[in-house]
Each structure stands twice: as C-alpha cells, then as structure tokens.
Image (tube, rainbow, N blue to C red):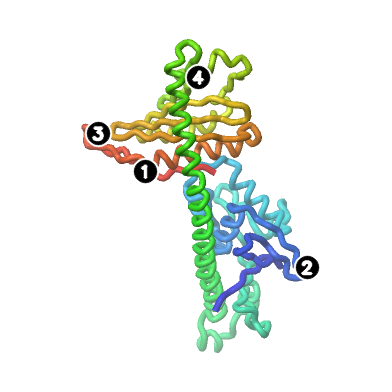
Amino acid sequence: MTSECFIHHWLLDISSGSLIHQQTGEQRRLGEYQLKLLIVLVQHAGKILTRDELNTLVWERRVIGNNSLPNAIHALRVALEDDGKQQRIIKTIPKKGYILEADFCQFRREPAETEEDEVSVEENLAEPLAEEEIREAPDAALSEFQVAQAEWNAATQQENERLTAIRQAKRNRIWRRVSLVQALALVALVALLLVIRQAGPRNDMTMQDEGVYSNIRLFELTRSYDRLATREDINNLLSSTLFALNQMMASQKVDMDVFFFTSGSTLNYTLALKNRCERRQLALNISQWHTDLSELNDLIYRETERKLNEMATCINESGSVNAAGADYRAD
C-alpha cells in the first residue's frame, strides 16, 4: 500500500519534482534542493530542524552559501502559498531552525474510497478519544498517522533511489561521450606545450597572482606572435572556487598547477595535481566559457574535486594519513 502526501492542498509529486494543486491541477516545479528540503521537512513534520541538520540532510555536507537554505525556504513558502510574515506552514524558529507544521500535512493511503482513509494530524488530534476508546485502541489516531507517514517515507526512499539511478546512468552516458573528447584535448594540450617549449621566445608562460594561494599556482600560456590574443584574469573569475579548492588541498597536502590559454571563445584549462605518492592531470576544453561564469565555477570545482578524490592516500613519515578521497562538495 502506498501513500500520497498533501501540504496545504498541494500534492507533493516526487517523480516529477513538483507540487500539484488538488482542485485546479496547477503544477509548480521545484528545484532539486527545494524538493529535497521539502521532503526532509515532511519526513520530520512537527519537529524543529536546525540549520546544520538541514544542511546535512539536504545538501549532504556540500559547501554552500549562507543564503542557500533561507532562499530555498522562501521558494517553498511561495510555492505553498504560505505568508512569509505569518509563516503558517513553514515557520522560522529564532536561533533554533525551521519547522513544517504537522497540521498542514495529510497522508492519503491509496486514494481512499471514503473520507475515513484520509489521515492528518489536525483531524486525529482535534477530537480526543473517549476513555473507553482509549482502553480499546490506545493511540489509535496517532498510530494511523504514523503508519501512513512511514509508508510515504518508504515510498519516497524508493522513488529517490530510482531517480538517483536514472541520473547516474545519464551521467555515465555523458562521461563516456566526453571521455574521448577529454583524451583528445589532453593530447592536443600536450602537443601545444611541446610546441610552446620548442618555439623559444615566440611563446610565454606567465604566473598569475603569485602567493595568493598556498597550494595552487596559475600559469597563463600566451603566444607573443598572436597580437590579437587577450589576457584573461582567471583568478578574478574563479576566485571563490579557487579559495575553496585551496583549503581542501591544504588539508590533504596536495599541490595543484593550472595551465590555461584562450582560443576564440574556448578556454583550454589543464590542472595537474601532485602529492607525495601520486600525480594526476586533467585537461578541459570549455566552449562559450564567458556565457555563464556560475556554471564555469561549478564545472571547475566539480571536476577538480573528482580528480582529487581519485588520488591515492599517502602516509607521511610521522605515520599520519592524508585522506585524498575525503568527500567535499559545493552547492
């Protein structure tokens, strides 16, 4: 038996990642983390969840901005037609966290034939059981709500696992397609580096912002004979991402050199990671990279983190371990 969850007349449809109005059929799509946040709030309806708990349950310890959670809460209030000032459905508890009022949660088990099958905290607790009823069926109303909620939680977990498997399969197909492109890009970059080395004074490699990062060095490859080439300040464009990566690398005792150059609308970006026991390298050719700097930062962070997590674990002379496979993520 499955259960459906309604929040203030809105059906939470996990498969489509949206809210569907019971009467009008209006559909409102939610973002990935907005959907995860709402599911977590429903699973803990009536309970105050701290910011740290929500960050762990929803963003899974990713590094996120201070406004990510408040912005997601605001988006859910707008979608559920909740007044931001009165906060009837999702409440902000000062210095504690957030709570989804259980009175607004209803769990319906397999679209019921009678109204008795619809279970809500408000209905079950509005009329206390008589003493005789309590003796015959103690906590009957509450247990019925808990059963429906548990069934919904189980169905939600299965649906999340199914959607995760679909997304992972899609990512795998994408990576299989781009792996060849990356290999060709690496070969092309290596060939370019050889040309630069052999071309003498016609080519140059300049370090950008030396000393800004403890574990990262940036090198711009330029060709002195290409007068149309424009200098790009990668540090300025990727500063927040590079600072976050630098902290990660400092904690794991990994150094990174970045070599880049631009060709038309394409950014050729190569990173080389090195620790005491291993070296890793990744080359990226990013087209139209100036179009969306937020997407560029996300791509650089994600691919660098992935390569870093592939590095072997090193044990230094004192016996301590540098866990190069630690789990760091960004929002």
Q: Are marks 2 and 4 in contact (CB under 8 Å)?
A: no
The Cα–Cα distance between marks 2 and 3, rounded to whole angstroms, is: 64 Å
Viewer-closest of 172 and 239: 172
Question: Which label is found at residue 24?
Answer: 2
Q: Are marks 1 and 3 in contact (CB under 8 Å)?
A: no
Viewer-closest of 290 and 121: 290
Q: Nearer the viewer, mark 2 or mark 4?
A: 4
Q: What residue is pinned by disc 3?
A: 316
- The image quadrant of residue 230 is top right
Residue 234 visible in the displayed image: yes
The Cα–Cα distance between marks 3 and 4, rounded to whole angstroms, is: 31 Å
Q: For the residue marked with disc 1, what is the amino acid?
A: Gly
The Cα–Cα distance between marks 1 and 3, rounded to whole angstroms, is: 16 Å
Quadrant in which the C terminus appears: top right
Q: Nearer the viewer, mark 1 or mark 2?
A: 1
Q: For the residue marked with disc 4, what is the amino acid?
A: Gln
Q: Residue at x 40, y 27 (%)?
A: 215
Whichever of callouts 2 and 4 sits on the residue coming sooner in the sequence is 2
Q: What residue is pinned by disc 4?
A: 208
Viewer-closest of 139 and 42: 42
Q: Is residue 128 above or below residue 12?
A: below
Q: What residue is pinned by disc 1?
A: 325
Residue 53 visible in the displayed image: no
Whichever of callouts 1 and 3 sits on the residue coming sooner in the sequence is 3
Q: For the residue marked with disc 3, what is the amino acid?
A: Asn
